[in-house]
């Protein structure tokens, strides 16, 4: 596996453009399975997770072409009912988002249980509950998920937890169901709003995305979308914001939706970082002396679990004591052990991490345990004295487009080994 070598002690300055949102692009690509015409998608990041998803969609007959940088077309004219290969499905948690579209369009779907980063339990029960309410017959046999229905029928569905994946899967399936579907206690993430906008572009009738209740009026078929621009990646933007603050930098981020990163911006301001908004641009300027802050991760619009690891790295050198409570995924604190190898003082007690700021971190050999932990170690390496060798760079490649190049534009020194 590749390694990243990060040289510490360089202040990040300059401007950087944020790529398209990984999680929005993955869901939209799955939704393209239901389109009967051509779909053209713009601002698609050329990252490993998207490459895996493209191969999965191709296995069910889709023709997908990269037209130019970050722009692809999808033609579903040759679609057939197939089973995506086990080896690819196990690489990607979002592969489960193919079940809803396949069930809705073909009347059946078969998929092995998905893989992805080991950050905690992410069960499929809410997905199954929604599909069953829509009239599907479901089975889980020897690690295989099977769903069948001649045609789904609208229903009223209440989610016990505002799961992003379940909200997306049920919403997609409901687009081709007969009648109205009402989904309550849904997730509100910007990626869900983007997915709903894309589906409406195809001819779906979805209202309420971004609120507690989503209403879907089923249609007989979905058409084409000649050009759809995926939203910017709020987690990539957030990672650069934290990196700027951690290195004492001054960074201009372009192609950002400020509202989407507001939970992080608020915490950085609380810590003493200057964050200014101007249209789709954010300016992040570090303070001379940062203050400790407490963080509790929550579903959107709360503080995102995907930014918790990066903030832990930053807070490890902030004077005083900070606390981080993880309310979404129980394995998010695995990065703490790697930060301790760099000299951080982090104590984990169940779902709480207590961080006592140290004067500095020191470069050493560490390992990325998941995508966001890898990003956190890059942030830590940029702050540390000396060089940091990060094993498991393939985790980072799953979610960040041209990370080394973008950091180099800002004055960071990161190379692949």
Image: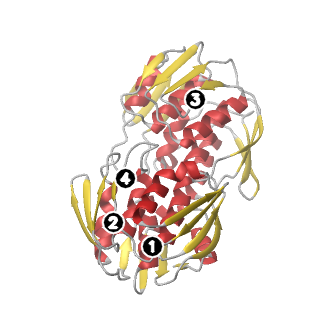
Q: Secondary structure at mark 1?
A: helix
**Foreground label between 2 and 4:** 2
In the rendered view, would you say 227 is above or below 271?
above
> Which dot marks residue 172?
3
Tell me how far mark 3 sits from mark 2, CA to CA.
42 Å
Who's the residue at 49% across and 75% down the image? 4
Q: Could you say which is closer to the camera, residue 21 or residue 120?
A: 21
**Number of numbered tags placed on the structure image:** 4
> Which dot marks residue 246?
1
Who's the residue at 34% across and 48% down the image? 329
Tell me how far mark 2 sits from mark 1, CA to CA.
13 Å
Is 118 displayed left or right of 209 in the figure?
left
Tell me how far mark 3 sits from mark 4, CA to CA.
26 Å
* Residue identified by numbered label 2: 292
* Residue identified by numbered label 4: 118
Callout 4 crowding tier (Cα within 10 Å): few <14, some 14–19, many ≥20: some
Point out the tag, 3 or 4, that comes first from the N-terminus: 4
Point out the tag, 2 or 1, that comes first from the N-terminus: 1
Q: Secondary structure at mark 4?
A: loop
Q: Could you say which is closer to the camera, residue 96 or residue 41?
A: 41
Tell me how far mark 3 sits from mark 1, CA to CA.
40 Å
- The answer to whether residue 281 is seen in the rendering is yes
Q: Secondary structure at mark 3?
A: helix
CB atoms at circles 3 and 4 under 8 Å apart? no
* Residue 345 x %, y %: 25, 72
Callout 1 crowding tier (Cα within 10 Å): few <14, some 14–19, many ≥20: many
* Residue 360 x %, y %: 34, 81
Who's the residue at 59% across and 12% down the image? 179
Tell me how far mark 2 sits from mark 4, CA to CA.
28 Å
């Amino acid at each position: 596996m590749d390694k990243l070598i990060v040289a510490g002690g360089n202040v990040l300055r300059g401007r950087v453009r944020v790529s398209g949102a990984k999680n929005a692009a993955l869901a939209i690509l799955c939704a393209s399975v239901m389109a009967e015409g051509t779909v053209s998608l713009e601002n698609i990041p050329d990252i490993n997770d998207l490459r895996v998803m493209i191969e999965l969609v191709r296995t069910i007959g889709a023709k997908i072409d990269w037209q130019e940088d970050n722009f692809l077309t999808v033609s579903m004219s040759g679609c057939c009912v197939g089973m995506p290969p086990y080896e690819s499905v196990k690489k990607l948690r979002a592969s489960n988002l193919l079940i809803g579209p396949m069930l809705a369009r073909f009347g059946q779907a078969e998929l092995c249980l998905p893989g992805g980063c080991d950050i905690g339990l992410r069960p499929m029960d809410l997905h199954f509950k929604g599909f069953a309410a829509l009239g599907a017959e479901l089975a889980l046999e020897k690690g295989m998920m099977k769903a069948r229905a001649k045609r789904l029928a609208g229903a009223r569905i209440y989610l016990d937890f505002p799961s992003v994946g379940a909200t997306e899967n049920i919403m997609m399936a409901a687009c081709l169901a007969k009648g109205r579907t009402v989904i309550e206690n849904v997730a509100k993430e910007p990626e869900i709003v983007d997915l709903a906008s894309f589906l409406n572009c195809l001819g779906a009738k979805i209202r309420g995305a971004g609120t507690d209740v989503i209403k879907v009026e089923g249609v007989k078929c979905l058409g084409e979308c000649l050009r759809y621009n995926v939203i910017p990646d709020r987690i990539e933007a957030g990672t650069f914001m934290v990196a700027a603050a951690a290195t004492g930098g001054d960074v201009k981020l372009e192609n950002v939706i400020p509202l989407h990163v507001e939970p992080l911006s608020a915490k950085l301001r609380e810590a003493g970082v200057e964050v200014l908004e101007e249209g789709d641009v954010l300016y992040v300027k570090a303070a001379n002396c940062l203050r400790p802050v407490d963080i509790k991760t929550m579903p959107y619009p709360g503080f995102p679990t995907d930014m918790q690891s990066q903030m832990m790295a930053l807070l490890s050198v902030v004077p005083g004591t900070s606390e981080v409570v993880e309310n979404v995924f129980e394995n998010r604190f695995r990065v703490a052990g790697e930060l301790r190898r760099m000299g951080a003082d982090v104590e984990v007690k169940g779902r709480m991490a207590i961080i006592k700021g140290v004067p500095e971190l020191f470069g050493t050999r560490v390992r990325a345990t998941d995508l966001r932990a890898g990003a956190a170690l890059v942030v830590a390496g940029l702050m540390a004295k000396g060089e940091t060798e990060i094993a498991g760079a393939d985790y980072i490649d799953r979610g960040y487009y041209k990370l080394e190049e973008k950091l180099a534009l800002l004055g960071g020194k990161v190379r692949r080994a």
